[in-house]
Each structure stands twice: as C-alpha cells, then as structure tokens.
Amino acid sequence: MILHLKSHLSQTLAFPQFHPNQRRPTNSPRPSFSNPINPIPLVKPALKCSASVLSEKTHVELTHAKPFPAEVSRTIMELSSAGTLSTLTHDGWPLAFAVRLTVDGDGTPIVCLNASDRDLSFDRRSSLHVQLGQCGVRTPQCTIQGSLAKPRDRMILKKLCSIWEKRFEEEANEDRIHIVTVGRVLHIEDFQEDGVWLTSSDYKNANPDPLRDVAGRIVNEFNANNMEDILRFCSVYVDLQFQVADAKMVWVDRLGFDVHVYSPEYGIYEIRIPFPREVSDEKGVKSSFNGMSQLAWEVEKYYHVPDFKKVKQLKQIAPRSRSRPSSR
C-alpha cells in the first residue's frame, strides 16, 4: 500500500517499492543482509494534508527475466583472461593451444602469441574458446569463429597494446599482439547442453552485464551469510512441488539470479528468479534483495497476500542419485 500525502502545495512523498500490509511486530526478527540499504527517513510535513490509499503490485514482472545469449557471451569474454586458440597448421593438422586474451570495446579478442607460435604457418581461419566457471557448478562457454589477424595500422596496434597493458599491467610486445576477427559465435550455457549460434553483429551490438565485476563476490557473500533467505526466496517466489533440502545461488546479473536447489527425492534443479526491476550496480542488487526478502518474510508469516506470479520453469541439472549442491 502506498500512502500519498497531498498538500495544498501538491507535494508528494515517495516510498520504497516494497510495503507490508500490516506493521511488523517489534519483537519479530527481520531478515538482514551485509551492508543493508538505510531506510528512507519519513519527515512529517508541517502543512495540513489529506490522505488517500492506493494499491500497487509489490513484485513487478520483467519482460525478459534473463539476459540474451549475446549479452552472456560478451560478459564471458570481458571476464576471461585466458582461452584456447585453435587453427590449422600448414600440413592440415588441427592445433589448439592456450593463450592469454582481452577484448576491445566491441568485444573483438586480443591475443598475445609466443615467439614459437608466431613462427608456425597457420591457416588464418581460427576459433577461440573461452569458458567462465560460476560458483563451481556451472560453466557457460563462448566460442568465436573468425580469422587470426595482425593489425598493420600503427595507430590501431598502439591502441590494442594500450588495452593489453591496462588489463594485465605489463608492457605489450607489438610483434606478438594479434586479434581474432569475429565471424560468428557459439554460446553454450553449460557442459552437455546445446549451443546457440550468434551473428557477428548480434555479438558486437550486445553489452556485457554491468554487474560482471562484482557478481562473483555478491554470490559468494550471499551463499555464506544468507542461506535462510535463499531458501525463503525459493519457497515464496517459485512454484515448487517438492521440499527443498538445500540451495545455492549460482550467478547474479542485471535482471535476476540463478539458484540450484536440491531435493533428495527429485535431484538438483536450476531456477531463475527475476528482480522486481532491472538493476545496474551493487547498490541496486542489495536494495532488490532487501525488498524481496522483506516481502518474502511477510508472505511466509501471512502478513501479506502474494500478488505476483510465481516462477514455474525449472531445469533439471542432475537426477536424485547425484550428490547435493554445497551451500558453502
């Protein structure tokens, strides 16, 4: 419920998104997070005013609850510093070897070859495979097909070296710097899953996730300190037909977060829980978590009637014979 205070000067006070229908008892515990967002102080206006009551949904459904594959591939490339470069030698044999890498502004990979690698007679057609481990339970992957190229423009080469030096904090050798031009991209969510082919323009026009640099730390902190809240999220926001024995947050992005849940009877499932609204930074993530936890607590204690659609889509990760996900 939102209380609108209308004064003769048409002043309106704004309140946070999530609101209880009833005031919580003072002796009841409240879920908390590390570095919680301070509540907005409510200042009483001196002017006379009238009060009106309006209703508003407490949990807004996003149109796209998950980033598109091109966005995830861009995020993988931004966060990775090493990958596997594959090409053909002059005699037609495939050759794959590890390389360090970074990317430029549109996601084009920059690699630094060893002196011995540069002496090989490569077929310039190449692929670069990169993968990103997430919480030890999921490994999204990005494979770029294109051509291995050596920039000839002196200014472009200096720019690439500058990007390399900023990433690795070391001087770049101009003779060893190459790029892998992006022809098309294969995105795979995890091992043993089907991939999605992306065009070069889809990949280059996508933006990497704004939370990429803090996502891993947020997930680790949440799994270590807020397991009760993760279980409550699954119970309140997901339409589960079984009892969850354990749960683990896997990843968080601007649109929501992924959780693996374990049931002794049914095995391990992956669940996608969206945020009420898109976030762009760590402060927004914590604010959303605080609001969702507040609402989930009130629904669980019957202080609030749920007025949102529960998540119904679950993806089975492992049958019940597999071991449970570790919550630590």
Image: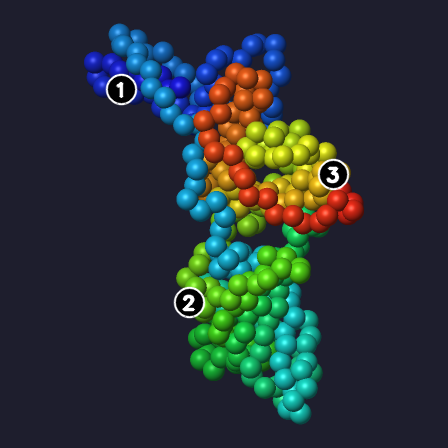
Q: Which quadrant would residue 145 be assigned to in this image? A: bottom right
Q: Which mark is residue 220?
A: none
Q: Which mark is residue 265?
A: 3
Cα distance between the residues tagged 3 and 1:
56 Å
Which residue is the site of mark 2?
201
Quarter of the image for the N terminus: give it: top left
Task: Give the mark toward the camera: 2 or 3.
Answer: 3
- Residue 169, placed above or below residue 313: below
Tell me the mark number nearer the camera, choosing from 2 and 1. 2
- Quadrant where the image shows the C terminus: top right
Measuring 61% from the left and 47% from the top, which residue is drawn there?
Answer: 315
Gap in Å between the C-alphas at discs 2 and 1? Answer: 48 Å
**Percent from the top left, x then y, of residue 283?**
50, 36
Of labels 2 and 3, earlier in sequence is 2
Number of the label disc, if any, that sits on residue 11: 1
Q: Is residue 317 left or right of residue 297?
A: right
Q: Position of residue 97 (x, y in %)?
A: 69, 75
* Along the viewing direction, whichever of 251 and 313 lies nearer the viewer: 313
Tell me if residue 224 can be seen. Answer: no
Q: Is residue 131 left or right of residue 103?
A: right
Please give the name of the residue rendered at 65% of the width and 44% of the height, measured from the top-left corner.
269
Q: Earlier in the sequence, mark 2 or mark 1?
A: 1
Q: Quadrant of residue 84?
A: bottom right
Element at label 1: loop
Q: Give the mark nearer the N terminus: 3 vs 1.
A: 1
Label 2 secondary element: helix
What is the C-alpha distance between the residues marked 2 and 3?
45 Å
Measured along the vertical axis of the image, is residue 162 above or below residue 226? below
Residue 58: x and y in percent read 44, 27
Q: Residues within 10 Å of mark 2 (few under 14, many from 20)?
A: few
- List x then y, in percent, for residue 20: 47, 18
